[in-house]
Image (tube, rainbow, N blue to C red):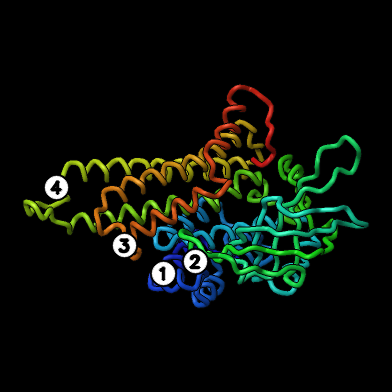
């Protein structure tokens, strides 16, 4: 299956009016409306970085990033789902071939959700692992037939480090606890996954250590440049990019609203107020800085992957920092716009208010913590060995 980046983005843009029209209903449902998910499936939007051998488009990651940003500028929850569900189709390509066959062997449109924080329990068993517990924040799980859960297995040998892995389970092995009642990213349906004891064969797991060292077993099938990009420089994109889109949407809404507002005291236009102009200018600069940095990073890493050149650890550490800092810049830009939005800004149906709630929800994700990302980058800059293999 072949499609150009331009054709893919045209498909994305064609669906944006419907996405915008359903924002309020999506928030009421606390998940995407059926029509939105069905349209995204029919247009193949989740296939952007899925392998071609599994009827994906295998596009460059910068195109996927662009799509997430543009959708998130209209609806953060919808952009978030495109990002996280879409990147899972890239992640599955790193798993052993039999795991990919289990999921896509009969239907390549099957989707999977994740919850990667190792909150459950894992025990070793013959031929695999026994998994139990509760995992939170599994975005889009209502529409997915598989889930990938993070966990730490006991070491195989005494004195060895714990074995951090991702475990792939079919829908019959878990249940969804509908507990998603939140103030931001309301329509992502990021509910809890509960497993009451399930066996996961070894081939349906993926080691974080293998991911860090680019020893992904899926390379036996998927050896294109897209799958030579390290996990820790691709996966965080899906949870950082929506913040940039949200900020762009807030900026557009602020510009439009401020252009219409009038100061009731002297009937002057607020757009002529130097303070309003400063708020807009500073926010625009931060958003543009975040957007440009992440886009350029993706172009750079993809060029290296296409040339079969290794992405050095110091670059990987920098990319990890840039992703988190892009979220930080986006959040501060939206905060500044919210402060200047006036009394109408606090209404729930105001796009600036929604953006403010959504961007804070995005920042709350552990993967978007700038302090932790700074530690990864700072250690690298000081020449210290990495103490985190998730980059």
**Residue hosting label 3:** 347
Secondary element type, mark 1: helix
Q: Position of residue 330 (x, y in %)?
A: 41, 46
**Which of the two discs, 3 and 2, labels the residue nearer the N terminus?**
2
Category of crowding for the residue at label 2, using alpha-carbon neighbours closer than 10 angstroms: few (below 14), some (14–19), many (at least 20)? many
Q: Quadrant of residue 130?
A: bottom right
**Residue hosting label 1:** 23
Q: Are marks 2 and 1 in contact (CB under 8 Å)?
A: yes
Q: Quadrant of residue 383?
A: top right
Of the pair 198 and 324, the residue shown nearer to us:
198
For the residues labelled 3 and 1, the Cα–Cα distance comes to 15 Å
For the residues labelled 3 and 2, the Cα–Cα distance comes to 18 Å
Q: Which mark is residue 272?
A: 4
For the residues labelled 4 and 3, the Cα–Cα distance comes to 24 Å
Position of residue 247 relative to residue 134, above or below, is above
Residue 382 located left or right of residue 161: left
Of the pair 282 and 215, the residue shown nearer to us:
282
Q: Are marks 3 and 2 in contact (CB under 8 Å)?
A: no
Residue 136 located left or right of residue 268: right
For the residues labelled 2 and 4, the Cα–Cα distance comes to 37 Å
Work out which quarter of the rendered image holds the C terminus and state it.
top right
Position of residue 311 relative to residue 124, above or below, is above
Category of crowding for the residue at label 1, using alpha-carbon neighbours closer than 10 angstroms: few (below 14), some (14–19), many (at least 20)? many
Residue at x 63%, y 44% (from the top left corner) = 232
Residue at x 52%, y 49% (from the top left corner) = 364
Secondary element type, mark 2: helix
Q: Position of residue 222 (x, y in %)?
A: 72, 55
**Residue hosting label 2:** 187
Judge whether residue 214 can be spotted in this image: yes
**Which of the two discs, 4 and 1, labels the residue nearer the N terminus?**
1
């Amino acid at each position: 299956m072949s499609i150009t980046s331009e054709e893919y983005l045209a498909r994305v843009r064609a669906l944006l009016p419907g996405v915008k029209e359903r924002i309020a209903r999506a928030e009421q449902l606390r998940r995407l409306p059926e029509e939105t998910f069905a349209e995204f499936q029919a247009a193949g939007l989740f296939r952007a970085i899925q392998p071609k051998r599994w009827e994906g488009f295998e596009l460059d990651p910068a195109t996927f990033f662009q799509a997430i940003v543009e959708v998130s500028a209209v609806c953060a929850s919808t952009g978030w789902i495109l990002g996280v569900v879409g990147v899972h189709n890239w992640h599955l390509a790193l798993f052993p071939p039999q795991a990919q066959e289990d999921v896509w062997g009969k239907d390549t449109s099957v989707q999977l959700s994740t919850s990667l924080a190792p909150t459950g329990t894992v025990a070793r068993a013959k031929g695999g692992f026994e998994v139990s517990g509760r995992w939170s924040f599994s975005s889009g799980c209502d529409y997915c037939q598989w889930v990938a859960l993070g966990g730490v297995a006991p070491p195989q040998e005494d004195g060895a480090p714990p074995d951090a892995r991702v475990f792939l389970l079919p829908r019959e092995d878990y249940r969804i606890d509908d507990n998603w009642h939140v103030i931001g990213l309301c329509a992502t349906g990021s509910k809890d996954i509960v497993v009451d004891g399930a066996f996961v064969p070894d081939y349906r797991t993926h080691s974080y250590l293998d991911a860090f060292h680019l020893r992904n077993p899926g390379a036996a099938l998927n050896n294109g440049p897209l799958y030579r990009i390290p996990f820790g420089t691709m996966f965080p994109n899906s949870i950082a990019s929506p913040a940039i889109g949200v900020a762009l949407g807030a900026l557009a809404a602020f510009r439009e609203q401020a252009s219409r507002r009038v100061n009731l005291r002297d009937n002057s236009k607020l757009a002529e107020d130097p303070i309003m102009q400063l708020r807009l200018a500073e926010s625009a600069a931060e958003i543009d800085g975040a957007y440009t940095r992440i886009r350029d990073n993706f172009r750079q890493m993809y060029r290296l992957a296409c040339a079969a050149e290794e992405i050095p650890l110091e670059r990987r550490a920098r990319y990890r920092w840039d992703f988190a800092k892009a979220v930080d810049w986006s959040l501060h830009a939206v905060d500044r716009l919210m402060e200047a939005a006036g009394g109408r800004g606090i209404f729930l149906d105001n796009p600036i208010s929604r953006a403010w709630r959504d961007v804070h929800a995005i920042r709350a994700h552990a993967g978007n913590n700038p302090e932790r990302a700074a530690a990864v980058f700072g250690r690298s800059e000081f020449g210290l060995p990495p103490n985190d293999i998730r980059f």
